[in-house]
Image (tube, rainbow, N blue to C red):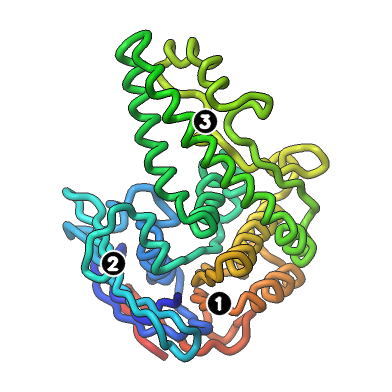
């Protein structure tokens, strides 16, 4: 699927914008603080139901307004723009939160947006995928698993509810938690199995991306959230005394992580900021290649100032790895004349929150 049309209202500094996007390479240029990244955020919101810059969606609403609205039209069929067409809309209200629709019907889960508009981003903060804790890496992994395993989204929603019920039972007192252990264990094992399978499948793509980016060699491992020598049911039983003291579930796939090591040490401990960025880009490229291979999913890729923090040599490696993906690209840059990816198919200019074609 590609994004063919985008309408944005009251999103950060943008009052109103309408863009007709090309299935190939789209460039958004303009000065700092003019709204380039905000447009990428709006596109990301359409496919994920959230921003890639903040967890608080209310911060995206333009100052003095009560809500923001983003609407898009997605199409399948490649450059010919023939095939399935979907209308996707997301509204964020200060009072009512986030609501989303696909073809005018309310979605049950924001994750359902990814089915009609798969989108991924590489931005200057991508190094946090390596630098920070497991939450970001779980989210990175789960987005791929969602596209590979059709039932994963349902399992994850049910698992989250079961953990909440188990935590409530822990607060209720001894003995109330056991009925929830079976549900948490059964769903948790399915989730972990699906995740582990994707990590195994992604390994060759990961090694290829690492080599292509001239990045330090790294070892990619999945930690399931409890000891590998035990089942989740056994781990829940062993953890119950601690859980009852703190009234929270300490083991399970919600505590999982994708561990990345270089020469036996965690990557974040030994790599520079630039190296962390390259390694995070390698993770994203490996993910996109896997999705194309196993599910025929070709996401739209958003590139926010791709030249940031990369020298000329590594930028060249980066470009050589992106181009073979043959996906829709939306790229931001300060100047249209300085383009690492060559001549774009469509150019937009942003100035003081106003957007227009060039």
Badge number at residue 338:
none
Tag nearer the camera, 1 or 3: 3
Give the mark nearest the N terminus, 2 or 1: 2
**Quadrant in which the C terminus appears:** bottom left
User: 227 left or right of 117?
Assistant: right
Quarter of the image that includes the N terminus: bottom left
Residue annotated with mark 3: 252
Q: CA distance from mark 2 to mark 3?
A: 32 Å
Query: Is residue 35 something one can see in this rendering?
Result: yes
Sequence-wise first label, 2 or 3 = 2
Label 3 element class:
loop
**Residue 356 place in picture, x, y as percent:** 35, 85
For the residues bearing labels 2 and 1, Cβ distance under 8 angstroms: no
Residue 76, position in %: x, y? 43, 80
Q: Residues within 10 Å of mark 2 (few under 14, many from 20)?
A: some
Relative to 345, residue 172 above or below:
above
Residue 46 at x, y = what percent? 36, 65
Residue for point 44% across, 23% down: 181
Q: Which residue is mark 2?
A: 102
Marks 1 and 3, Cα distance to the nearest angstrom?
A: 35 Å
Is 293 in front, or is 98? 293
Q: Residues within 10 Å of mark 1 (few under 14, many from 20)?
A: many
In terms of image quadrants, where is residue 82?
bottom left
Q: CA distance from mark 2 to mark 1?
A: 22 Å
Residue 327 bears which disc, if any?
1
Instruction: Check disc 2 and report its element: helix, strand or loop.
Output: strand
Label 1: element kind: loop
Between disc 1 and disc 3, whose residue precedes?
A: 3
Residue 62 visible in the snapshot: no
Task: Name the residue: 27% across, 63% down.
Answer: 90
- Disc 1 to disc 3: CB gap under 8 Å: no
């Amino acid at each position: 699927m590609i994004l063919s049309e985008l309408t944005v209202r009251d999103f950060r500094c943008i009052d109103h914008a309408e863009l007709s996007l090309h299935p190939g390479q789209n460039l958004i240029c303009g000065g700092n603080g003019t709204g380039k990244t905000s447009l990428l955020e709006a596109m990301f919101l359409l496919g994920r139901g959230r921003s890639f810059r903040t967890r608080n969606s209310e911060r995206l609403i333009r100052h003095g307004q009560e809500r923001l609205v983003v609407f898009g039209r997605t199409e399948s069929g490649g450059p010919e723009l023939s095939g399935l067409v979907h209308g996707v809309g997301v509204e964020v209200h200060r009072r009512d939160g986030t609501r989303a629709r696909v073809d005018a019907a309310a979605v049950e889960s924001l994750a359902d947006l990814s089915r009609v508009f798969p989108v991924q981003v590489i931005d200057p903060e991508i190094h946090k995928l390596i630098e920070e804790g497991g939450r970001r890496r779980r989210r990175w992994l789960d987005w791929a698993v969602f596209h590979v395993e059709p039932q994963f989204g349902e399992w994850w929603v049910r698992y989250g509810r079961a953990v909440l019920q188990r935590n409530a039972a822990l607060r209720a007192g001894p003995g109330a938690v056991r009925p929830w252990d079976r549900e948490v264990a059964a769903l948790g094992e399915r989730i972990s199995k699906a995740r582990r399978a994707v990590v195994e499948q992604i390994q060759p793509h990961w090694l290829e991306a690492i080599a292509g980016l001239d990045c330090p060699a790294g070892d990619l491992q999945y930690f399931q959230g409890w000891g590998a020598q035990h089942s989740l049911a056994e781990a829940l039983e062993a953890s119950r005394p601690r859980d009852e003291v703190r009234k929270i579930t300490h083991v399970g796939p919600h505590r999982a992580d994708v561990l990345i090591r270089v020469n036996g040490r965690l990557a974040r401990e030994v790599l520079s900021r630039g190296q962390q960025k390259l390694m995070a880009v390698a993770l994203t490229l490996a993910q996109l290649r896997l999705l194309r291979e196993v599910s025929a999913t070709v996401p739209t890729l958003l590139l926010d100032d791709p030249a940031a923090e990369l020298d000329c040599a590594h930028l060249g490696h980066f470009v050589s790895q992106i181009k073979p993906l043959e996906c829709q690209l939306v790229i931001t840059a300060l100047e249209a004349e300085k383009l690492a990816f060559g001549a774009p198919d469509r150019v937009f200019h942003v100035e003081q929150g106003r957007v227009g074609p060039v």
